[in-house]
Image (cartoon, rainbow, N blue to C red):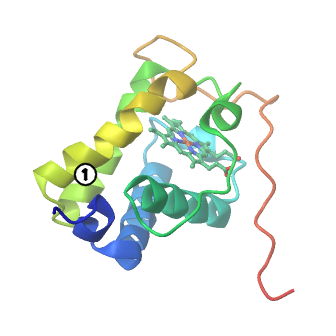
Amino acid sequence: MERSLFDRLGGKSAITSVVDDFVARAAGDERINSKFGRTDVPRLKSMLIDQVCEASGGPCQYTGRDMKTTHTRMGVTTGEFNALVEDLVATLNKFGVGKKEQDQLLGVLAPMKDEIVEVDSRKTGTPLPPSYQPAPALAKSGS
Ligand code: HEM
C-alpha cells in the first residue's frame, strides 16, 4: 500500500517548513501581499499547517474558517490565485518535493478555487477592501 501524501511530504515538521517559506514568499510578492495587510500571520501559518496536514492524510484537524467565509469580500482575482499557486510551487521546488507529490497536493487545493476567487480578471496587486473582516488573532498559548 502506498504511504499517505502526508508521510511522503515528510510529516508535520516538513509541512511546517514549507508553510513558513511559502508565507514569507507570499508576503514578499507584490502581486498578492496587500491582501495580507491586516492578517495575523501566526494564525495564518498555524491554520495552513493544519489544513495541509489534514488534507494530505495526516493526524491534524483544521479548525479555521471555511474557505468561502475566509475569502469572501477579499476581492481575489484569478491572476492573484495563480500567483499564489506559483509561489507555492516555488516553495515545493525549493524543498525538493517530487512532481507526483506536488501534483497530488495541488489536486487537493485546486478545487477550492471556486470558493476563493471573486473577480475573473488577470489583474494582480488589487487592494484588500476596507470592509474585509480578518479572523481574530490566535490566542497566546500558556495564558
Ligand atoms: C488554494 C488556495 C488557497 C488556500 C488553500 C487558502 C487557505 C487559507 C487558509 C486555511 C486560511 C486561514 C483561515 C483562518 O484563519 O481561519 C487563509 C487565509 C487567508 N487567505 Fe487564503 N487560501 C488560498 C488562496 C488564497 C489567495 C489566492 C489569496 C489572495 C491572494 C488568499 C489570501 C488569504 C488571506 C489574506 C488570508 C488571511 C485572512 C485573515 O486575515 O483572516 N488566499 N487562506
Q: Position of residue 85 (x, y in %)?
A: 34, 39
Please provide percent x and percent y for residue 71.
64, 33
Callout 1: few (<14), some (14-19), or many (20+) C-alpha neighbours within 10 Å?
some
At 48% from the left and 11% from the top, the residue drawn is 120
Q: Nearer the viewer, residue 118 or 35?
A: 118
Looking at the rendered image, the quarter that the N terminus falls into is bottom left
Is 52 on the left-hand or right-hand side of 117?
left
The residue at 60%/37% (across/down) is 67
Instruction: Look at the image and tell me in which quarter the C terminus lies.
Output: bottom right
Where does ligand 1 appear, by image quarter?
Answer: top right
| Observer able to see residue 86 | no
Q: Picture coordinates of residue 75 (x, y %)? A: 62, 23
Task: Indicate left or right for 43 with 9 as reference.
Answer: right
Say if 57 sits above or below 32 in the image: below
Numbered-mark total: 1
Amino acid beneath label 1: Ala
On the image, which quarter does residue 139 sit in?
A: bottom right
Hey, which residue is sitting farthest left in the picture?
99
Depth order, front residue of 8/40: 8
Question: Could you tell me which residue is drawn at 70 percent across and 58 percent down?
Answer: 40
Kindly give the residue lying farthest to the front in the view shown.
Answer: 1
